[in-house]
Image (cartoon, rainbow, N blue to C red):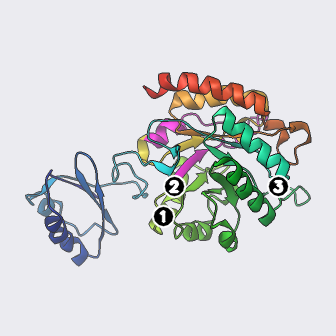
Amino acid sequence: MIIVLKPQVTEQQIAEFSRYFADHGVRVNKWVGEQSTVLGLLGDTTGIDTDYILAQSIVEDVRRVQEPYKKANRKFHPDDTVIDLGNGAKIGGGSLALIAGPCSVESEEQIVQLAKDVKAAGANFLRGGAFKPRTSPYAFQGLRAEGLELLRHARRETGLPIVTEIMSASHLVLFEDVDVIQVGARNMQNFELLKELGKVDKPILLKRGLSSTIEELLMSAEYIMASGNEKVILCERGIRTFETMTRNTLDISAIPLLKKLSHLPVVVDPSHAGGKAELVPALSLAALAAGADGLIIEVHNDPPHALSDGAQSLTPEQFAELAKHLRELEPVFKGQ
């Protein structure tokens, strides 16, 4: 249930009004926007009398919410959430964020040079895998803690905030100096991990599972937010379908749907969606046109010899060309 309050309502009035819900065992989540104040009721609201609420002088409107996700719901939070790390590193708010870097961190020379290359091309964030979940146990699993240190070194060299994936809550102590923690598709419904990430005060980039519905993605975001961390970024990275000519199928429709249903920023991973480097530019442009807040793109200095996902990685030169094209079209699609 959500309650829209009238303008100029005071904090004292809100506090007194909220006691009614506390007496019924319902928690109140307050959101203050530019035009109004909204109260979101969390818990069993079946015993709440809507006529009583509407009779209060401070109440503009009251609506019952059917969706099981509350904190991630745009009805509770009408304005877009913007994740702002400072120094121009922002996801949401009308601009397109570019997150770029290799699938796996392989060496200091590799990650530092790629960080410099993607920054020069216009990237706002550096991505790179230190812990790598792989389908085969014999595939390269990442440099792990060493890879995190190399990412931090690349950040010192370039100033780019780093985005990297976590696989276990036991690794959280290693991620204290990571700017944005990524939850991969395979861990989207690792609820114990999500609850622990809800206790962390830093942005979480949550990737949609391989066969997960949009509502399941939002419910996973809800796990993080319900535990206290509301800095969540949703990522559409393609879903598994019957098609075999691409690695996954990019669900373009998920972008406007997520923007309608939730206030959280939405980024798109065209690299994992198509699985082929030649598809990345077209999928990136489609995501921009559909309203994405950002793109997370794999870039490697030598894709044929990459230790993971070389086939879907752009070269620095290809990324620079794509980034230039995206920036030229951004004012058109973003209405700037």
The CA span between labels 3 and 1 is: 30 Å
- Amino acid found under the numbered disc labelled 3: Thr
Secondary structure, mark 2, is strand
Q: Circle 3 is placed at which residue position?
A: 135
Q: Does 18 sit above or below residue 105?
A: below
Q: Residue at x 57, y 71 (%)?
A: 196
Rendered image: mark on residue 232: 2
Rendered image: mark on residue 254: none
Q: Does 213 sit above or below residue 326?
A: below
The CA span between labels 2 and 3 is: 26 Å
Disc 1: CA contacts within 10 A as few (<14), some (14-19) or many (>=20): many
- Type of secondary structure dominating the magenta stretch: loop
Give coordinates of residue 103: x percent, y percent.
Answer: 77, 47
Q: Residue at x 45, y 47 (%)?
A: 82
Q: Residue at x 39, y 58 (%)?
A: 70
- Horizontal side of 246 relative to 25 (left or right) equals right
Magenta region, residue range: 232-259
Q: Residue 214: tell me if it is visible.
A: yes
The CA span between labels 1 and 2 is: 7 Å
Secondary structure, mark 3, is loop
Give coordinates of residue 319: x percent, y percent.
Answer: 72, 31
* The quarter of the displayed image where residue 192 is located: bottom right
- Residue situated furthest front in the rendering: 157
Query: Of the residues under marks 3 and 1, which one precedes in the sequence?
Result: 3
Q: Does 193 sit above or below residue 71?
A: below
Secondary structure, mark 1, is loop
Disc 3: CA contacts within 10 A as few (<14), some (14-19) or many (>=20): few
- Horizontal side of 271 relative to 264 (left or right) equals right
Q: Circle 1 is placed at which residue position?
A: 229
- Amino acid found under the numbered disc labelled 2: Val
* The quarter of the displayed image where residue 193 is located: bottom right
Does the segment drawn in magenta span residue 235?
Answer: yes
